């Protein structure tokens, strides 16, 4: 459905962005369908945003008219709590302001990126390096940082063995980033259907999780497992794949509690952790890293009229690997 | 029940130890009652052992007749897997040889420390520094190392806030060790019944987990929580007490799977981990650390005839804080 939303007047520290592309994230679908709770309708979703600066407030120093910029999953935070001060605004203790469906500082509900323009505080606007193809930028702002952050935090790199569970929008970025960091990467996907892609993205190994032999053959192998699947998994089975001091990090967000056997944690002193997007400074690092390493998401560009069909295709895993809406189709 | 067990003949690298004291660990009770599965009867339990060397094999270089020594939860390991090579014999991939109820290298079932003598490979025998009171040494070999190891691994120290869940045999050692490491220590116990003791051991704060206010007041507080309770806990509630990058480490071993909400891990990028005793080198470090800092368990010394009563008192938390059997009562 097409509608008109209001953006706030440009404040002194705000940037007005003319949006060119917006990625479709599984979270958008969860949100509009009410899977995660009540929704403040009318709502425009979208938190993978790229565009150009067309106007800046009087005190803006970080961005200039004409700059190519991005906006991700959050547009503000308290900036005072210990997590904000540590540059981890995504973990803002009073709660960060989400790019959509959050209460903004002026009391209105934030509206996302499936739209022609957005007004964002300069501190939550990212610089996009030239090397990244324009239509491929947007998914980096959620799928990219969501996988980059735990890979960086848990030290994926030369000499480490990393497994990526799931080969969707997040998973395929996790593979590319972990490979660029120098890790030995294994994909664990339900089937071998995307094996050729996985190896092309740089993974050295690709196993089907539907084959029980996988869990025997790979026992005690990985330093880090990034689970991108939002459906519940058998946590104990994946924990069994971790070597000494290994960590299973969930970036997928199943609402159901997952049962964990403490004995699966005792062996090899394993950890089960969660990670949520990344801080603003780290998001900038991620963009710079992707530019430097020639990494970009695989995208399928669609017009706004195709969004509903695209949602169905996301839900049936029929996208390789991220839909991006050409916002010109809205103009 | 009193019986006679055979020890193997002294091998070239073995040490014969005349046992003086053996601690009573909750694991002993779980084992003899079959809580953790079938038991290879007849079995002598006990894996907190102190005594003196009375004979050494021809190739023994690390210990001499007359030395005061200790033996903990394991008496051998494969020594070849990556974990053994990393000095983490407790995580030996083929499995370490437990001090009791394991299959020893000669095919017999290992027998524990509620006995007058034991024969152990020199590499699994610890040197006991003079400063530790003799009757208080034994519990360090399990309760001490089980809490020291995660405190050291997760960097408890000046500037960190550590919570200890449970004030039993393990918990009281966790408090003393974390305080000696320089951490700010909080005890989370079901009631305030042992508060005076907790503060005497050096904790700065003491809260009752039966009071729901505790979980609100302490939200986002701790860098590290050591859970020593073997009964199932509400993992999500305890995760909520962790600040950015905090870790909840279970050393208690409930057999039931524990439900974990992934969203509780996302906030503050939290981890839920397990830890099992410690390596031999680290156990030696722990003994040296306790001697240096004047730390010892609080013990109640009993004769062998009182073991069955002591078991009942352990199960009803009626011990402050560890029973130790005077093995002279067996002679």
Image (tube, coloured by chain):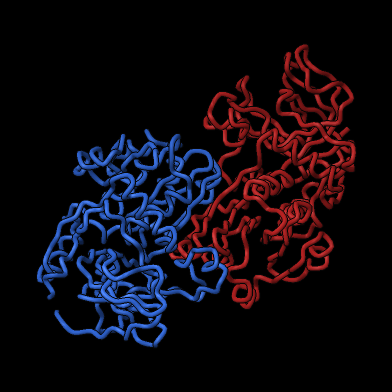
Chain colours: A red, B blue
Visible residue check, residue A312 = no
Which residue does the image show at 39% across and 38% down from the upper left? B182
Front-most of B312 and B281? B281
Residue B180 x %, y %? 35, 42
Q: Quadrant of the N terminus of chain B?
A: bottom left
In this rendering, position of residue B173 left or right of residue A240: left
Examine the image and state in which quarter residue B306 appears: bottom left
Q: How many marks?
A: 0
In this rendering, position of residue B57 left or right of residue B268: left
Examine the image and state in which quarter residue B210 appears: top left
Question: Is residue A256 shown above or below A82?
Answer: below
Visible residue check, residue A32 = yes
Question: Is residue A86 shown above or below B245?
Answer: above
Residue A224 x %, y %? 62, 57
Which residue does the image show at 66% across and 36% down from the upper left? A279
Residue furthest to the top in view is A58
Residue furthest to the bottom in view is B107
Which residue does the image show at 62% across and 50% down from the upper left? A154
Examine the image and state in which quarter residue B68 appears: bottom left
In this rendering, position of residue B92 left or right of residue A32: left
Q: Quadrant of the C terminus of chain B?
A: bottom left
Question: Is residue B270 shown above or below A256?
Answer: above
Front-most of B113 and A217? B113
Residue A265 x %, y %? 48, 61
Which residue does the image show at 22% across and 66% down from the upper left? B22
In this rendering, position of residue A99 left or right of residue B315: right
Front-most of B295 and B27? B295
Residue A117 x %, y %? 80, 28
């Amino acid at each position: 459905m097409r509608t008109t939303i209001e953006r706030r007047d440009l404040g002194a520290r705000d940037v007005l962005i003319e949006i060119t592309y917006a990625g479709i994230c599984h979270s958008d679908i969860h949100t509009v369908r009410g899977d995660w709770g009540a929704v403040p309708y009318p709502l425009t979703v979208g938190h993978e945003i790229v565009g150009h600066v067309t106007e800046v407030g009087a005190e803006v120093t970080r961005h200039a008219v004409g700059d190519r910029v991005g906006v991700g999953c959050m547009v503000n935070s308290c900036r005072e709590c210990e997590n904000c001060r540590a540059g981890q605004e995504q973990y803002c203790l009073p709660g960060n302001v989400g790019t959509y469906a959050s209460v903004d500082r002026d009391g209105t509900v934030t509206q996302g990126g499936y739209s022609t323009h957005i007004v964002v505080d300069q501190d939550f606007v990212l610089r996009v390096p030239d090397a990244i193809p324009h239509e491929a930028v947007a998914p980096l702002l959620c799928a990219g940082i969501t996988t980059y952050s735990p890979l960086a935090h848990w030290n994926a790199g030369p000499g480490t063995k990393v497994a990526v569970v799931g080969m969707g929008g997040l998973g395929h970025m996790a593979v590319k980033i972990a490979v660029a960091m120098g890790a030995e990467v294994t994909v664990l996907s339900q089937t071998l259907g995307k094996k050729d892609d996985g190896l092309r993205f740089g993974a050295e190994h690709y196993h089907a999780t539907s084959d029980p032999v996988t869990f025997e053959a790979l026992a005690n192998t990985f330093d880090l497992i990034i689970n991108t699947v939002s459906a519940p998994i058998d946590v104990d089975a994946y924990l069994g794949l971790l070597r000494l001091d290994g960590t299973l990090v969930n970036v997928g967000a199943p609402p159901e509690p997952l049962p964990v056997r403490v004995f699966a944690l005792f062996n090899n002193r394993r950890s089960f952790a969660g990670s949520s997007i990344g801080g603003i400074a780290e998001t900038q690092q991620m963009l710079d890293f992707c530019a430097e390493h020639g990494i970009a998401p695989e995208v399928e560009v669609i017009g706004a009229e195709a969004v509903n069909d695209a949602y169905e295709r996301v839900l049936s895993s029929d996208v390789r690997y991220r839909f991006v809406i050409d916002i010109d189709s809205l103009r």
